[in-house]
Image (tube, rainbow, N blue to C red):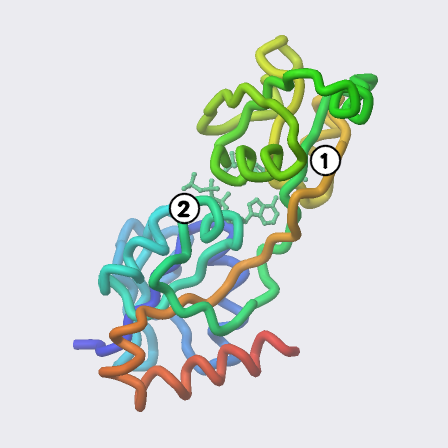
Amino acid sequence: MADISIALSKGRIFDETVPLLARVGIAPKSNGASSRKLILATHRSDVRLIIVRATDTPTYVRYGGADLGIAGRDVLVEHGGDGLYQPVDLGIAACRMMVAVKKGFDYEGAVRQGARLRVATKYVNITREHFAAKGVHVDLIRLYGSMELAPLVGLADAIVDLVSTGNTLRANDLVEAEQIMPVSARLIVNQAALKTKRAALQPLIDAFAKAAEK
Ligand code: ATP
Ligand code: PRP
């Protein structure tokens, strides 16, 4: 039975974590991308990977379902990183949280004139705080995906979403209006586990920090 578990999500986070894990000396035994298994053994008998939804990673780590986790800053800020130790910015899954609008929409003008903006997003907490700090009134429309559609069909004036290459915005006639924050994935740690398993966890945390520097 492995003593250390690391929670991470399938897809982008998993794919970008595998090379980091290799530098730390950990390789999954099976191919996580294609496996339906939710607990993956690794070639280190004391370490296993737990596959969770991206937004659930902080929850698993906070309540001890996993000792360590890898979660985007977007998820940690939106859903709360409280009670979690966040020792390493891994620099992977890098993108930025942006306000975007339909090409031709005068965002600066709307903000300047104190217009009430309709903003569609799945990041409602981040969005609320961002616009509150600017003193801009917003009507929030909570979506679960495909935010880019909202301004195109008149559901919203603006969206708040992650942007990396900008291809999704371009393909949908949207443009970046304002950056809210840069985003990358962090190593998160259960605080109780850090006390009870420090001898096992600290070298791993240090190895992640070193691997992320390269
Ligand atoms: P869920 O499955 O819970 O809905 P998701 O669809 O957001 O989550 P992913 O798309 O795999 O899951 O994103 C996981 C993390 O990767 C995000 O939380 C974010 O930190 C980062 N990310 C998302 N989109 C991009 C992108 N275009 N480029 C780089 N990193 C990204
Ligand atoms: C993310 C994000 C954008 C897109 C931006 O979606 O929600 O739609 O990436 O990336 P780009 O600037 O490189 O085009 P993702 O691909 O994760 O799809 P999902 O959120 O629907 O899973």
Q: Residue at x 40, y 46 (%)?
A: 79
Where does the image place residue 108, in percent across and percent down from the top left?
80, 26
Label 2: few (<14), some or many (≥20) within 10 Å?
A: some
Disc 2 target residue: 79
Disc 1 target residue: 167
> Extreme left residue here?
1
Q: Answer yes or no: do the residues labelled 1 and 2 have beta carbons within 8 Å?
A: no
Where does the image place residue 112, in percent across and percent down from the top left?
79, 24
Where does the image place residue 64, in percent across and percent down from the top left?
23, 64
Where does the image place residue 194, in percent across and percent down from the top left?
31, 79
In the picture, the quarter occupied by the N terminus is: bottom left
Q: Respond yes or no on whether mark 1 lies under 8 Å from ligand 2.
A: yes
Closest to the observer, 120 or 170: 120
Q: Amino acid at mark 1?
A: Asn
Query: Real-space Cα distance between discs 1 and 2?
Result: 27 Å
SS of the residue at dot 1?
helix
Numbered mark located on residue 89 in the image: none
Closest to the observer, 109 or 24: 109
Q: Residue at x 56, y 79 (%)?
A: 211
